[in-house]
Image: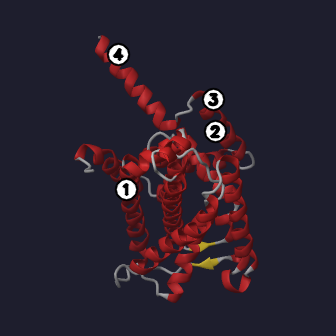
Amino acid sequence: MQFSLRDKAPVLLAAAILLAAPAMAPGLRAILFMAVAEAVVALGILVLLRAGQISYGHALYFAAGAYAVAFGSRWLGPELLLTLPFAVACSALLGAALGAILVRYRDIFFAMLNLAFSMVGFTLLLKLYDLTGGSDGLTVAQHRYAGLALPADDYGPATYALAVALLALALLATSRYLASPQGQALSALKTNETRLEYLGVSGRAVLYRAYVASAALAGLGGALAALGTGHVTPELGYWTKSAEFVFIAVLGGVGHVAGALAGAVGFELLRSYASAAAANAWQLIMGAVLILIVLFAPQGLCGLVRKAGAARAAKEASA
């Protein structure tokens, strides 16, 4: 399967907007940096949703990627070419180990077991103080780029640009995966797993590969978050963080990979402005928005955009 420029254009346009936004409003960079990291994790959630499964425990892999960057910078040196692959590999291996158990279950059991494993991981991060720093967490050193140490003023923008580039690659790779036979098998798994088995395709194997890929994406998102904030804490693995990733996926829309980015940007902007407007009630605002999305726009923000585009095209055709 080959992607044409037309297929890549929306991703390239989104990347260009993300890169240009901090230049116009410097205060947005911190917000968008976290949105980019969360969008990568939400891609993994979307992959599982394509199979009809949902995870309330992906904060475990998010935290694993973040802590892997912190540990990797100490063990391997603060070199991006080493710590980023190390973080993704650690999350993928953890996902491979737990996925061997989890793919035996479906629906609520799959979701709750993910949550259970995530809370075990959170507790370990919190209690193993000598290793993880406990609730204080760990500081992430400023990294080098292929041996090049950037000035402090250039490090933030360069790392943000790297995060946007990796998100663009993740969007294209996930889109290609979902369009591949393996991705189509995920849809078949959601619709009728028994029929998929009759065709000679193992539903467990299909879900297992998707789960490992999803864990790897979450690890990459965690690694980017660690680089962006310069600090990691056990809260990255708490269950509320997993709920945020599901919120992002629903907010953006599960029908297209662009929903991960739209949902993450919308979520971070909404949280930022809601916190500023109502510091003690921003969770109420977030909950109300989620209720409205589920009731009136079940296809999410991307669905609203597509619906508006279709209405405009129909209006022009009838004119």
Q: First in sequence: mark 2 or mark 3? A: 2
Tell me the mark number nearer the camera, choosing from 2 and 1: 1
**Which numbered dot is residue 315?**
4
> Which residue is nearer to you in this view: 148 or 55?
55
> Which residue is nearer to you in this view: 276 or 74?
74
Tell me the mark number nearer the camera, choosing from 3 and 1: 1
Q: Left or right: where does residue 47 sit relative to residue 154?
A: right
Disc 2 marks which residue?
290
Q: First in sequence: mark 3 or mark 4? A: 3
Q: Residue at x 73, y 68 (%)?
A: 120
Q: Amino acid at mark 1?
A: Ala
**Which numbered dot is residue 38?**
none
Q: First in sequence: mark 4 or mark 1? A: 1
Q: CA distance from mark 3 to mark 4?
A: 26 Å
Q: Residue at x 36, y 59 (%)?
A: 169
**Which numbered dot is residue 173?**
1
Q: Secondary structure at mark 2?
A: helix
Q: How many marks?
A: 4
Instruction: Assess whether mark 1 and mark 2 are in contact (beta carbons under 8 angstroms).
Output: no
